[in-house]
Image (spheres, rainbow, N blue to C red):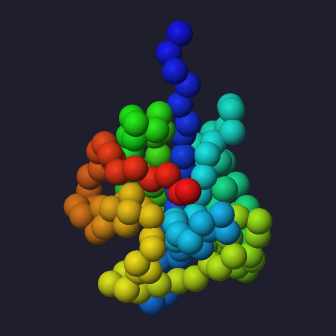
């Protein structure tokens, strides 16, 4: 029997000024894209909507799959989608003590490196879905 792995879903959300939404984690001094792990049996888009709502208070719709990221060292696969906010207001929660929009050229220095790579990927060829292996160690603590 093979090892189990996790599936993560993350949203890239821009405001009207094309600033990107990031969440500051309560468990460590790092910023990340909103999202998280799918529950067993959960549809990928339902999980994306749930995770973003739980982490931000925003209801979204997914517009485009940016990429699929294989992290074999962590037994993890992550999907990144560009999303639009359809309603809601930003609310802090148990996971995030700050939620803010940042200019793309001025992201916090303590943004998770894999998430920085994923944000950059969103500005590559819009016609292609990116599929890549991410090998950076992303342990939070």
Which quadrant holds the C terminus?
A: bottom right
Q: Residue at the location (33% across, 47% down)?
A: 134
Q: Farthest front residue?
A: 141
The x, y position of residue 42, in whole percent, is 67, 38
* Residue positioned 47% across, 34% down in the render: 75
Q: How many labels does the image show?
A: 0
Residue 27, horizontal then vertical, whole percent: 65, 63
- Up the image or down, 103 lies above or below 115; here it is below
Which of the two residues, 45 or 111, is positioned nearer the viewer here?
Answer: 111
The answer to which image quadrant residue 84 occupies is bottom right
**The furthest residue to the left:** 125
In this rendering, is residue 44 above or below 66? above
Q: Is residue 32 left or right of residue 67?
A: right
Q: Position of residue 125 (x, y in %)?
A: 22, 61
Q: Which residue is drawn at 67% across and 68% down?
A: 26
Residue at the farthest top position? 1
Q: In this view, does 14 lie above or below 127?
A: below
Whether residue 118 is situated above or below residue 16 in the rendered picture: above
In the picture provided, is 26 more to the left or to the right than 94? left
Instruction: Report whether residue 55 is seen.
Output: no
Q: Where is residue 129 in the image (x, y as percent from the top left)?
A: 31, 50
Residue drawn at (33%, 62%), measured in percent from left and top?
117
Whether residue 103 is visible to the viewer of this picture, yes or no, is: yes
Side of 49 where 141 appears, left or right: left
């Amino acid at each position: 029997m093979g090892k189990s792995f996790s599936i993560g879903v993350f949203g890239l959300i821009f405001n009207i000024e094309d600033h990107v939404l990031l969440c500051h984690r309560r468990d460590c001094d790092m910023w990340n894209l909103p999202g998280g792990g799918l529950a067993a049996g959960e549809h990928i888009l339902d999980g994306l909507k749930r995770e973003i709502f739980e982490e931000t208070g925003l209801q979204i719709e997914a517009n485009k799959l940016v990429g699929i990221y294989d992290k074999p060292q962590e037994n993890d696969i992550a999907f990144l989608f560009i999303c639009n906010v359809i309603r809601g207001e930003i609310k802090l929660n148990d996971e995030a003590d700050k939620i803010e929009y940042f200019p793309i050229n001025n992201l916090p220095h303590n943004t998770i490196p894999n998430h920085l790579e994923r944000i950059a990927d969103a500005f590559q060829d819009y016609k292609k879905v990116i599929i890549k292996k991410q090998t950076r160690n992303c342990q939070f603590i």
